[in-house]
Image (cartoon, grey):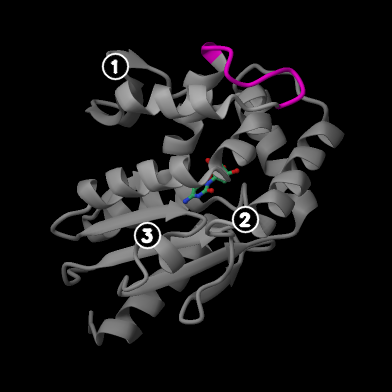
Amino acid sequence: MTIPDIIIAVDGHSSTGKSTFAKLASKEFNLLYLDSGAMYRGVTLAAMELGLIGPEGELDLDGIRTLLETLDLKFVSTPEGSRTFIGDRCVESEIRTLAVSNNVSPVSAIGFVRAWVDERLRAMSRGGRVIMDGRDIGTTVFPNAELKIFMTAEARIRAQRRFDEMVSKGENPVFEDVLKNIEERDYIDSHREVSPLRRADDAYVMDNSDMTLHEETVWLRGLVQGKFGILE
Ligand code: DC
């Protein structure tokens, strides 16, 4: 299906499968896929490695501000797809560990971190034809995005998905820890002062608790056809 040069914003709760959905849509509609959460995860990993986040989650704000002055965090296109790099080091798997997941929400609640990430996301999206997933894409980063989708699902179902994903990567998670992490992140993400997670008024809601990936793509195709008057 050929669609116009638009920006599609995909927001929603953690582990709703936003990135899987957005990646599929990027292939289907020939759009550039950008994972905004990977930017927050990259900043968090870099801060952890420099000891700027304490064992109880204490943040060294001055240290993080200085880190951002030189942090070379980017997406690199590789034969396996787009990957997150710090300098010439691929950090794609490290940014997905539970240790990073446990620290990323407080880091992403820092106003100057958000401004730093937003600037980069907008620069990478110049020219349109982008699908980006995150928490505030349709509300803050691209309030004028032509299509906005808000994804959600029950917390236990999301925890089970993240749990299965971690097991498949050889990690040894405890289900209750994963669930707790999801619930805590939901809370922090939707209660922070700067750009809290919320559905944009003009976003279409998808609750995929009981949906297969195939059903999600059928849903999206129908939405895009209806919205842009595309006949197949
Ligand atoms: O989508 P994810 O789980 O990889 O996101 C990681 C964290 O980054 C999540 O806890 C919330 C934060 N985030 C955000 O605040 N704003 C975004 N646009 C994307 C992610």
* Rendering coords of residue 220 (x, y %): 42, 70
Label 2: which residue?
A: 13
Which residue is nearer to you in this view: 90 or 221?
A: 90
Q: CA distance from mark 3 to mark 2?
A: 17 Å
Q: Mark 1: which amino acid?
A: Gly
Q: Mark 3: which amino acid?
A: Val
Q: Is residue 140 magenta?
A: no
Is 38 positioned to the left or the right of 158 in the image? left
161 up-or-down from 122: above or below: above
First in sequence, mark 3 or 1: give its number. 1
Which residue is nearer to you in this view: 122 or 170?
A: 122
Task: Kindly identify the residue that appears in the image at 68 percent across and 63 percent down.
Answer: 210
Label 3: which residue?
A: 141
Q: Which quarter of the rendering shows the N terminus?
A: bottom left
Which residue is nearer to you in this view: 87 or 111?
A: 111
Q: Which quarter of the rendering shows the C terminus?
A: bottom left
* Rendering coords of residue 190 (x, y %): 66, 59
User: Mark on residue 87?
Assistant: 1
Residue 218 showing in the rendered view:
no
70 up-or-down from 145: above or below: above
Which residue is nearer to you in this view: 172 or 185?
A: 185
Disc 2 or disc 1, which is closer to the eye? 1
* Rendering coords of residue 63 (x, y %): 50, 21
Q: Which residues are magenta?
A: 49-57
